[in-house]
Image (cartoon, rainbow, N blue to C red):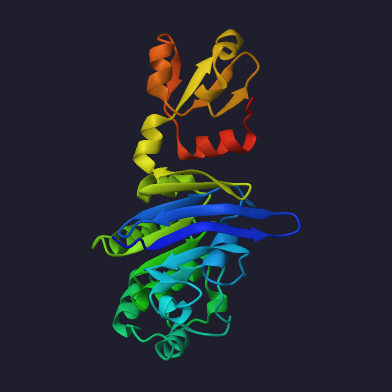
Amino acid sequence: MINAIEIKNLNKKYQDFQLKDVSFKVPRGSIVGFIGENGAGKTTTIKAMLNLVSRDGGTIEMLGMDTLKDEKKIKESVGVVMDGCNFHDNLKTGDIAKMLASIYKKWNQELYQQYLKKFKLPDNKIIKAFSRGMKMKLQIAVALSHQPDLLILDEATSGLDPIVREEILDVFMDFIQDEEHSILISSHITSDLDKIADYIVFIHQGKILLNEEKETLLSKMGVFKCGEEDFGKLEASEYLRYRKNQFSFEVLVNDKAAIRKKYPNALMDGVTIEQIMLFYGRGGKQ
């Protein structure tokens, strides 16, 4: 089966930052959550995918096509929503439709109107008068109305209130129901990914640290809580990161079942995507 996105050994070097051999896939019919702290490389990776920045090495394929050789064809079939609105403030929703109908071969005006109605977006106001949530809904309506096979979303739910985010997440879930459409969503709002993501790709300081099915990841990992003596007995290979509190340690382990077997009295909690990020971002490793 053709992956919706396949990135191999992507490299991009700046003066103070580097993407280092970034590789991951977005299986067709899935939602992949792309996570990492601010400055980890999420947006740089997405811009390289869209040829908005040049790459120093590596290959990127979307929908089975090379993004350098087949850029125009790919962009007909990819919907993109970035953080912030790129439409001119003085345009109205109808103005946008007229422009994009002449750009996209599969522009569907009826579908666009359906999304405007669903999102309660007025057609008599200029975009400058839209709230942040309304602008984000407009971008999503536009991205979906040229009937893409793939959605790429960079912090598309950032700064939105919970009700608006829930509404948008429902639209994303509807989009992939036919198992042909796919979504890559970059977000630091991990609760959104808890709800909708099938896979999690975690980038940290320009490197991919985790790339796994979400349910498998969360079922395998755990937080081992122990005192200093028990922490000292752990081998380096048995844990990923640790955090030291005043009287105890919290330890992120990759195989909680194995730790429970070796340490029967271990106090073990489940882990969330947010906790994984915190352990890697602020935890220690011996």
Asked whether 35 or 170 is in front, the reply is: 35
Q: Is residue 170 above or below residue 239?
A: below
- Identity of the residue drawn at 60% across and 54% down: 41
Q: Is residue 89 above or below residue 32?
A: below
**Can you name the residue that lies furthest to the right here?**
15
Among the 4 quarters of the image, the one containing residue 179 = bottom left
Disc tally is 0
Residue 85 % position (x, y) = 55, 72
Residue 193 % position (x, y) = 42, 48
Observer able to see residue 71:
yes
- Identity of the residue drawn at 47% across and 48% down: 201
Asked whether 6 or 281 is in front, the reply is: 6
Q: Quadrant of the C terminus?
A: top right
Q: Quadrant of the N terminus?
A: bottom left
Q: Is residue 129 above or below residue 271?
A: below
Observer able to see residue 82:
no
Asked whether 268 or 124 is in front, the reply is: 268
Residue 239 % position (x, y) = 52, 25
Asked whether 185 or 21 is in front, the reply is: 21
